Amino acid sequence: MKRLVLFAVLALVLGGCQKAPEKAPEKAAEKPVVEEKVLVNGIDGGGFPPYAFVDKEGKTVGFDVEAVEWIGKKMGFKVKHQPVEWSAIIPALEAKKIDMIASGMSATAERAQRVNFSDPYYKVTQVLVVKADSKATLEQMLSSNKKIGVQRGTVTAKYLEELAKKPGMKFKLVQYDSTDLSMQDLPIGRIDGSGMDSTIAKEVLKKDAKTKVVGTFDAAPENYGYAVRKDDAELLKKLNDGLKLLMADPYWVELKKKYDID
């Protein structure tokens, strides 16, 4: 009996001397994967070559498209392009449906009341395109009851709306959703001319040898700039810093050559 008691005591002592099983080493905390920020760039829904447009393969291309994508890579964000009706593009920006506008937008004083613009990167004038066989001068086009087409919501449209109110101006303004639509109506006689930015006219004349620029409107030249919301100072700085880098890089010259921009 004493032996049994002794064995029991020894078992308890030996059992208490055994080491507790070691815990498995904790895994090092994994670093969270930081996804690159994606910003939505609003472009002219009607297409605005060579700055921003959708090609035949359905890909968004253009000078501003490639420029802002290059800037994004340098500044740490990706760019997604979203076509928007031009007359509604600033409201879309204000409503945060898009984050910026890089699509050949003129940085006018009127627009600057609602958005902030980046540093300028291109200058344009306003011109009138007519059929190549037209004999009328610009002055005659504006004073002889001619029909002049224009894309609504553009600087050219605003200028022509104001011009039509001045004494001696006798033309009918026909507004379209895009310049392409107005140019479809020009050769069949629905309109007699189409007002547009000089940069668009350059593209038009490349495609259609049966058209010509009859003259430049008496309007101050406009600068193109990228637009952001008034409260988005961070993005504005990134775009300005990126533009400076881009314009100092050989890629800027390559882009201008690729899209035939002076």
Image (spheres, rainbow, N blue to C red):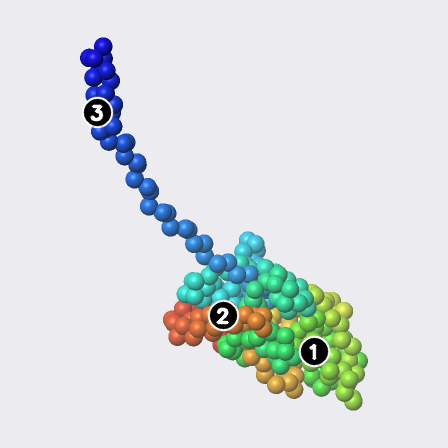
Residue shown at 38%/72% (left/top)?
Answer: 249
For residue 95, which quarter of the picture? Answer: bottom right
For residue 156, which quarter of the picture? Answer: bottom right
Secondary-structure class at tag 3? helix
Residue shown at 45%/66% (left/top)?
Answer: 71
Amino acid type for the residue under numbered disc 3: Leu
Whole-percent x and y of residue 29? 36, 47
Residue matched to label 2:
234
Amino acid type for the residue under numbered disc 2: Glu
Q: Which of marks 2 and 1 is nearer the N terminus?
A: 1
Residue matched to label 1:
158
Residue matched to label 3:
14
Crowd rating for badge 3 (residues with CA inside 10 Å; few <14, some 14–19, many 20+): few
Q: Which of 133 and 75 is in front in this view?
A: 75
Q: Nearer the viewer, residue 112 or 195?
A: 112
Whole-percent x and y of residue 137? 69, 84
